[in-house]
Amino acid sequence: MSRQLKVLVVASDGLTRQITANGLVMYGFEAVTARSGTEAMTRLETEKFDVLLVDADLGGEVGGLAVAKAARLLQPRIDVIYAARAPNRIPEPVKVKGAPCIRTPFQPQQIVGVISELRQRAPMEGIDRRVA
């Protein structure tokens, strides 16, 4: 039996965090939440995650794009998923390699689908997970 994938959900909106985390748990994931980039950084430094779902529009001292880059440096094998109101406005060079971006608002099952796609990719499919 395979282990549960551990997902860090980073969003400033409490309702979004809770609905997403609850939905992920219903689909068999372990979900941990963070309400800010600073809180996410603390969790990333002390816990191991398989997936990071981060609000690219996250404001504050540490923004969503910075959290994603730091996550990849701290945990090179982590899968990153961005959520944004306007995903097409995020320039590719500022995103981590191989990280899809979904439009908000989203449903938890959409996240599950994206995680499934990321997990089915061949490890050498052009994604260098060692570089942010």
Image (cartoon, helix red, strand yellow):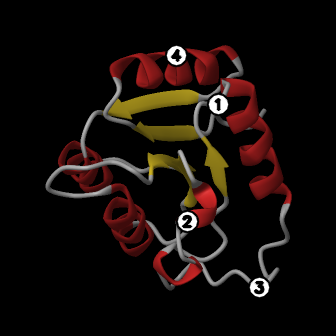
- CA separation in Å, label 3 and label 1: 27 Å
Instruction: Describe residue 107's horizontal placement relative to residue 122 as left or right.
Output: left
Name the residue rendered at 37%, 31% in the picture. Answer: 33
**Disc with the residue nearer the chain's start (3 vs 4):** 4
Of the numbered discs 2 and 1, the one sitting upstream in the chain is: 2
**Callout 1, which amino acid?**
Phe
**Tag 2, which secondary structure?**
helix
**Camera-side residue of 55 and 53:** 55
In which quadrant of the rendered view does residue 4 lie? Answer: top right
Residue 126, numbered circle: 3
C-alpha span from label 2 to label 3: 23 Å
Circle 4 crowding by C-alpha within 10 Å: few under 14, some 14–19, many from 20: few
User: Pointer 2 and pointer 3: residues touching (CB < 8 Å)?
Assistant: no
- SS of the residue at dot 4? helix
Say the numbered circle drawn on residue 19.
4
**Residue kind at label 3, given as amino acid type:** Gly
The residue singled out by tag 1 in the image is 106
Q: Quarter of the image holding residue 101?
A: bottom right
Q: Look at the numbered discs 3 and 4 and tell me whether their residues touch, using CB distance below 8 Å.
A: no
